[in-house]
Image (cartoon, grey):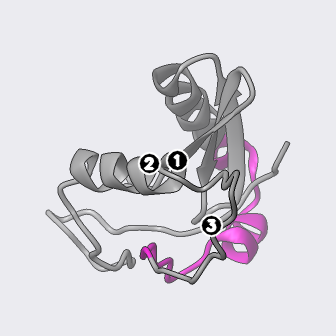
Amino acid sequence: MKQRFTAIIQKEEDMFVALCPELDIASQGHSIEEAKKNLEEAVTLFFEHASPEEIKERLKEDIYISPFEVAVAQTENSVWEGSLQDTSKIWLQGNKTKRKPYSNAKTNGEKHHNRSSTRP
């Protein structure tokens, strides 16, 4: 049986860090694809070795990912100019599920699970 989870991937220096918020498991890689693959392996290993109690404790039933805006003061050398706006546009274009809440609702016969594991 396959379960669907979320991967949030972020660049940190020369690596990419991937987080599964439903299980709070993270991994990393030198590329987005490698980080996601390593996260999939970490989640698989978690389910192979975790006790039912640990799975129940870590698994979050409802995870929602939603963009929001806040006012940021403009300065002469603003680090925000273009950087975050461009990133969010790429993320929204790359994900066809724009701004839909994530939940554990059944989709295509698969139950979505949420949250657990260790962070680096």
Q: Position of residue 32 (x, y in %)?
A: 50, 27
Residue annotated with mark 3: 115
The answer to whether residue 89 of the structure is visible from this angle is yes
Q: Find residue 29 and report its image quarter.
A: top right
Q: Residues within 10 Å of mark 1 (few under 14, many from 20)?
A: few
In the rendered image, the residue lying farthest to the top is 30
Q: Residue at x 69, y 64 (%)?
A: 75
What span is colored magenta in the figure?
46-67
Residue type highlighted by circle 2: Thr
Most extreme residue toward the right, as rendered? Answer: 120
Residue 59 is situated, as x and y percent measured from the top left of the image, at 63, 71
Viewer-side residue, 70 vs 67: 70
Look at discs 1 and 2 and give the one toward the viewer: 1
Numbered circle sitting on residue 87? 2
Camera-side mark, 3 or 1: 1
Residue at (57, 83) in percent of width and height? 71
Task: Tell me the residue at 14%/63% (across/down).
Answer: 108
Relative image position of residue 92 (x, y in whole percent): 29, 56
**Label located before the other in sequence (3 or 1):** 1
Give the farthest residue toward the left. 108
Q: Mark 1 and 2 residues: CB-CB less than 8 Å, in contact? A: yes
What amino acid type is highlighted by mark number 3?
Answer: Arg
- How far apart in space, not on screen, are marks 3 and 1 (Cα)? 29 Å
Dot 1 lies on which element?
A: helix
- The residue that label 1 is drawn on is 83
- Work out whether residue 2 can be spotted: no
Q: Distance between the Cα atoms at labels 1 and 2?
A: 6 Å
Q: Which amino acid does label 1 sit on?
A: Ser
Look at the image and tell me in which quarter the C terminus lies. Answer: top right
Is 29 placed above or below 88 here? above
Instruction: For mark 3, give the secondary structure.
Output: loop
Dot 2 falls on a residue whose secondary structure is helix
